[in-house]
Image (cartoon, coloured by chain):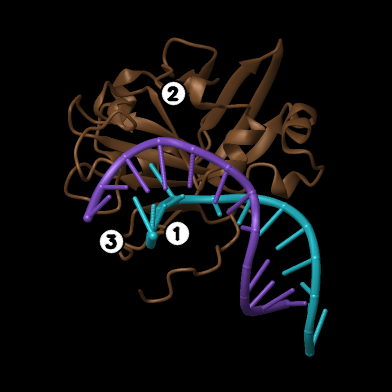
Chain colours: A brown, B purple, C cyan
Amino acid sequence: MSQKLGVEFYARDAATVARELIGKVLIRRLDGQSLRGRLVEVEAYLGQDDAASHAYRGMTLRNQVMFGRAGHIYVYFTYGMHYCMNVVTAEEGIGQAVLLRAAEPLEGLKLMQEHRGLEDVHNLCSGPAKLVQAFGVTKADNGLSLTDSDTWIEDDGASPQVVTSPRIGLSKAIDAPLRFTDRQSTFLSKPNKNRYTGR
DNA sequence: GGTGGGATTAGCT
DNA sequence: GCTAATCCCACCA
């Protein structure tokens, strides 16, 4: 029996929400089809005290959704070519969010493969920009509500073993243990090459 | 197996 | 002008 997550789930501390999102199922209805993927890797980004968070320097046009209501998605564009997707958490005005980094594809594999332009199931959602691409999310989805749209997250009762580790791809606050993964999963993002070696 | 560089844009300094 | 919550491909071993 699956239960759709409501605002009360999202309106808590980002680290708590992140830990509990592992094992939940992201669902999106698109073009008459269903896309489903089990979240296996996420990262928490805290508010203005977290140097690695987009919220660190306060609200801007780009990150204003982060400061909005919990349960909406913050989609941002980076590296000139990639989108990443976050779930806004906590109270309005704080600027906390959880970055969705990887998922295990469950349904709609054919459409995901089409979106990604490749077949390998282990390479469809194994990274934040890949996940977004597989699910057909774009900047037009920035601000979308997960409690009142064709995109949402469900609890199907799975209870994976959650492991904590430092966040990936950062140059600031690199030691904070705010990355949460499913220990059993083979669908995690690949360890990214270190471009910031000790700097 | 591993390393190195290119793509391409918004936001900050 | 530089950096970024990234990914992919070419090349070398």
Tell me the quarter of the picture where residue C1 sits. Answer: bottom left
State the count of labels.
3
Q: What's under tag 3, amino acid-wise? A: Ala
Q: Residue beneath label 2, please?
A: A142
Alpha-carbon span between mark 2 and mark 1:
22 Å
Q: Are marks 1 and 3 on the same chain?
A: yes
Q: Answer yes or no: is residue A182 visible.
A: yes
Residue A54, image x, y percentages: 30, 43
| Mark 2 vs 1: CB contact within 8 A | no
Under tag 1, what secondary structure? loop
Residue A143, image x, y percentages: 39, 20
At x 33% / y 37%, what residue is drawn? A97
Q: What's under tag 2, amino acid-wise? A: Asn
Label 2: how many Cα within 10 Å (few below 14, some 14–19, many 20+): some
Q: Residue beneath label 3, please?
A: A173
Q: What's under tag 1, amino acid-wise? A: Gly
Tell me the quarter of the picture where residue A45 sits. Answer: top left
At x 68% / y 19%, what residue is drawn? A34
Q: Which mark is residue A17?
A: none
Q: Residue beneath label 1, please?
A: A169
Quarter occupied by the C terminus of chain A: bottom left
Tell me the quarter of the picture where residue B1 sits. Answer: bottom right
Under tag 3, what secondary structure? loop
Alpha-carbon span between mark 3 and mark 2:
26 Å
Label 1: how many Cα within 10 Å (few below 14, some 14–19, many 20+): some
Q: Is residue B4 above or below residue A169?
A: below
Q: Earlier in the sequence, mark 3 or mark 2?
A: 2
